[in-house]
């Protein structure tokens, strides 16, 4: 019995030592990830060509002077709370839209040619990928424009003010942030916020949001004056925080 007890005790000690060793490796890995790499001049992902259903689309680097007539549709419940092409969480109750080519965050005036209603929406997603359709409206936008009940309508797209405040090179002005985390517990979010500010992201903030009944404390690194600056930061932060994405204020 004594020998058996020693074997059990020894096994317990070995397990504890193994646990400590694994914890050290885990913490060491986290410490290594905490260092932010230098910025690079890579092309933003949302401006790279992409292929859907065998068709390749080449996004525009500038929306200046863009105009288009065609069919609008809308999307909502099945996508609400999911990630859009620009990395935002889709909110069907906001005035946004999806377009195959326009730069993300472009402000576009959509005019319903069937009833004369007009509304400005922000591009934050790609689509629609249905033949003959040029824009997918959020549910809120569809209701405002009188498209919701019918499903589709003929519309005209025009860039509002030829991209108001556009900077040289076609960049949209900020402010913009990079979301790096979302937590149910505010304490965890506050810890991450402190780390970001210590790393030099003085404009970082917390925002509370409820999605499908779940409350989340979102952590936003910032603040950045343009989409280019925010995208550069996202590339740096993405190596530390998987799934980091750019958002508009």
Image (cartoon, rainbow, N blue to C red):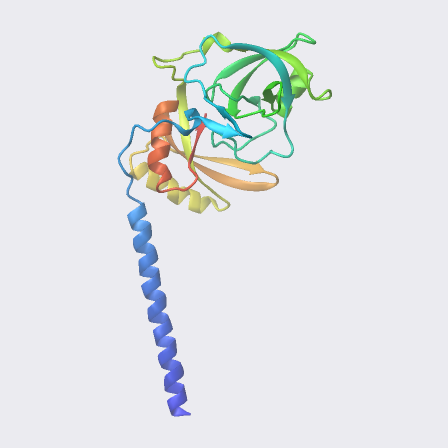
User: Compared to 238, does 60 lie above or below?
Assistant: above
200, 83: nearer the viewer: 83
Quadrant housing residue 235? top left
Horizontal placement of 154 versus 42: left or right? right
Res 226 visible: no
As drawn, the residue found furthest toward the bottom would be 1
As drawn, the residue found furthest toward the right would be 149
Res 150 visible: yes
Residue 223 position within the rendered picture, expressed as x and y whole percent measured from the top left? 37, 28
**Across the whole image, how many numbered discs are drawn on residues?**
0
Horizontal placement of 31 versus 60: left or right? left
Residue 61 position within the rendered picture, expressed as x and y whole percent measured from the top left? 41, 18
User: Compared to 173, does 34 lie above or below?
Assistant: below
The residue at 35%/41% (across/down) is: 239
Residue 136 position within the rendered picture, expressed as x and y whole percent measured from the top left? 60, 22
189, 104: nearer the viewer: 104
User: Compared to 118, does 193 lie above or below?
Assistant: below
The residue at 52%/20% (across/down) is: 122
Quadrant housing residue 137? top right
In the picture, which quadrant includes the N terminus?
A: bottom left
Residue 143 position within the rendered picture, expressed as x and y whole percent measured from the top left? 67, 20
The residue at 53%/14% (across/down) is: 108
Horizontal placement of 240 versus 129: left or right? left
């Amino acid at each position: 019995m004594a020998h058996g007890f020693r074997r059990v005790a020894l096994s317990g000690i070995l397990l504890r030592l193994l646990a400590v060793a694994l914890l050290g490796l885990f913490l060491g890995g986290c410490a290594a990830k905490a260092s932010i790499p230098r910025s690079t001049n890579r092309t933003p992902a949302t401006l790279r060509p992409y292929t859907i259903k065998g068709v390749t689309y080449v996004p525009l680097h500038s929306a200046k002077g863009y105009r288009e007539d065609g069919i609008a549709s809308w999307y909502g419940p099945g996508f609400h709370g999911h990630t859009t092409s620009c990395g935002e969480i889709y909110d069907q109750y906001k005035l946004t839209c999806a377009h195959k080519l326009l730069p993300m965050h472009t402000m576009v005036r959509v005019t319903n040619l069937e009833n004369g209603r007009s509304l400005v929406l922000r591009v934050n997603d790609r689509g629609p990928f249905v033949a003959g359709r040029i824009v997918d409206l959020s549910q809120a936008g569809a209701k405002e424009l009188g498209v919701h009940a019918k499903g589709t309508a003929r519309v005209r797209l025009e860039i509002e003010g030829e991209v108001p405040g556009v900077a040289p090179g076609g960049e949209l002005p900020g402010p913009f942030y990079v979301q790096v985390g979302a937590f149910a517990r505010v304490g965890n979010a506050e810890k991450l916020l402190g780390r970001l500010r210590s790393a030099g992201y003085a404009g970082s903030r917390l925002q509370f949001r409820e999605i499908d009944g779940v409350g989340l404390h979102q952590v936003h690194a910032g603040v950045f004056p343009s989409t280019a600056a925010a995208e550069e930061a996202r590339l740096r932060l993405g190596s530390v925080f998987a799934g980091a994405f750019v958002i508009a204020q």
